[in-house]
Image (tube, rainbow, N blue to C red):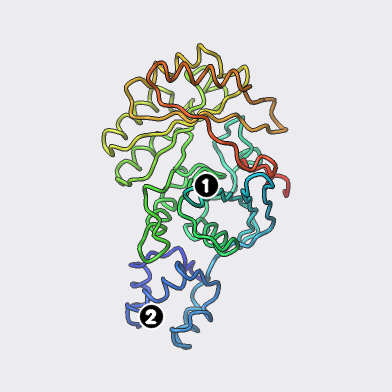
């Protein structure tokens, strides 16, 4: 079986070439072709000898993804991609245009096993983890298709990144490598629904990315009802891990909070949330929940959101309401993929 060459780090690629009897400096040339020039075939590597290209073709595959469907918002130029992988599975990515440049939201798994019941991503269940090359390819293909430079990444697409820990860490190191796209860690956000063991493992990596926690509730009763992960790690355990993470990394944590009408958006919920987060280096990002046809949840109205944010700010909690992008193209996670299944 051929190896996935795009998932190899530069050091791993050097070792592979030495085993093949080649000079290790050639690994740098190949790596640049794969990760800066984003080639899809070995024939495109014009400064590599024909013999080496032939040898690479025999032993390796260049995994990428192809555009199955592309939707462009008429409101804000947000672009949603449905990508088909080499094995036929489908994943989603979204490219958003901001004043500072382009941000891509990437998927880390095919499907999701976390089962948050207001999210479309896990309705069809979990299929498999994505490899580093498959996460990288979402960015490479989007850049090439749009002829833009993507400068920021959010790992908030389909899947739980900390449930695919090793592949995600390798992806993060490769995407920030100066020999690749060289996107700085401070321009990358990773979102977790609250996998506490993964938060501690991530803390040990000492990466300067932004950690986002999908909190979505101020107490265990509401959170366990909407997010099964809370039955394994409750809010106290999660917030304790967050405090440890902040202390170790000195990085502010962002708490994502989907505003669901009649579920978690009362003044009492706002006061309880503020009490739990008091004194923490954090920011709360309020998100009007996306409507999912299989669920009964509806987003909070504007008045409720304004009241909620005022209570947080009055209690010293920094909070904002996330700008909604791509509303006309179902830019929230999982919806496009489900439509094609």
Q: Are marks 1 and 2 in contact (CB under 8 Å)?
A: no
Residue 8, given in percent of the width and then of the height, sits at: 41, 65
Residue 181, given in percent of the width and then of the height, sits at: 42, 62
Residue 40 circle label: none
Reading the image, the residue beneath label 1 is 98
Q: Secondary structure at mark 1?
A: strand
The image quarter in which residue 274 lies = top left
The image quarter in which residue 197 lies = top left
* Side (left or right) of 59 relative to 282: right
Image depth: mark 1 or mark 2 in front: 1
Q: Please state which of residues 87 and 174 is positioned toward the viewer in this rendering.
A: 174
Q: Earlier in the sequence, mark 1 or mark 2?
A: 2
Q: Please state which of residues 293 and 104 is positioned toward the viewer in this rendering.
A: 104
State the residue at coordinates (37%, 75%): 27
The image quarter in which residue 84 lies = bottom right
Residue 135, given in percent of the width and then of the height, sits at: 51, 55
CA–CA distance in space, label 1 to label 2? 45 Å
State the residue at coordinates (35%, 31%): 242
* Side (left or right) of 162 relative to 97: left
Reading the image, the residue beneath label 2 is 20
Name above or below for residue 116 compared with residue 316.
below
Name above or below for residue 25 compared with residue 270.
below
Picture mark count = 2
Q: Secondary structure at mark 2?
A: loop
Q: Residue furthest front?
A: 99
Q: Please state which of residues 158 and 229 is positioned toward the viewer in this rendering.
A: 158
Badge 2 crowding class, 10 Å Cα cut-off, few under 14, some 14 to 19, many 20 or more, is few
Residue 206, given in percent of the width and then of the height, sits at: 29, 45
* Side (left or right) of 43 relative to 15: right
Badge 1 crowding class, 10 Å Cα cut-off, few under 14, some 14 to 19, many 20 or more, is few
Name above or below for residue 55 compared with residue 173.
below
Q: Please state which of residues 105 and 248 is positioned toward the viewer in this rendering.
A: 105
């Amino acid at each position: 079986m051929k190896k996935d060459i795009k998932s190899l780090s530069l050091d791993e690629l050097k070792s592979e070439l030495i085993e093949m009897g080649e000079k290790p400096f050639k690994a740098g040339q190949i790596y640049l072709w794969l990760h800066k020039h984003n080639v899809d075939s070995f024939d495109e590597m014009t400064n590599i000898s024909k013999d080496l290209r032939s040898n690479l073709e025999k032993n390796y595959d260049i995994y990428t993804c192809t555009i199955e469907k592309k939707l462009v918002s008429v409101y804000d130029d947000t672009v949603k991609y449905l990508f088909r992988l080499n094995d036929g599975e489908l994943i989603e990515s979204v490219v958003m245009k901001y004043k500072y440049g382009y941000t891509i939201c990437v998927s880390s798994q095919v499907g999701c096993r976390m089962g948050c019941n207001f999210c479309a991503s896990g309705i069809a269940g979990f299929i498999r983890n994505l490899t580093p090359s498959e996460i990288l390819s979402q960015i490479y293909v989007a850049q090439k298709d749009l002829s833009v430079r993507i400068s920021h990444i959010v790992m908030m697409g389909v899947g739980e990144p900390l449930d695919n820990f090793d592949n995600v860490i390798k992806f993060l190191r490769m995407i920030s490598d100066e020999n690749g796209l060289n996107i700085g860690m401070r321009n990358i956000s990773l979102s977790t629904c609250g996998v506490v063991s993964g938060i501690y493992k991530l803390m040990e990596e000492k990466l300067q990315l932004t950690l986002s926690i999908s909190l979505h509730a101020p107490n265990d009763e509401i959170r366990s009802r909407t997010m099964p992960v809370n039955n394994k790690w409750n809010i106290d355990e999660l917030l304790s891990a967050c405090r440890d993470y902040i202390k170790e990394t000195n990085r502010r944590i962002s708490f994502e909070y989907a505003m669901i009408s009649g579920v978690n958006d009362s003044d009492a919920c706002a006061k309880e949330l503020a009490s739990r987060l008091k004194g923490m280096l954090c920011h709360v990002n309020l998100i009007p929940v996306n409507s999912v046809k299989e669920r009964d949840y509806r987003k909070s109205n504007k008045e409720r959101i304004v009241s909620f944010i005022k209570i947080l700010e009055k209690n010293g909690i920094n909070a904002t309401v996330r700008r909604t992008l791509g509303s006309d193209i179902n830019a929230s996670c999982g919806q496009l993929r489900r439509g094609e299944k």
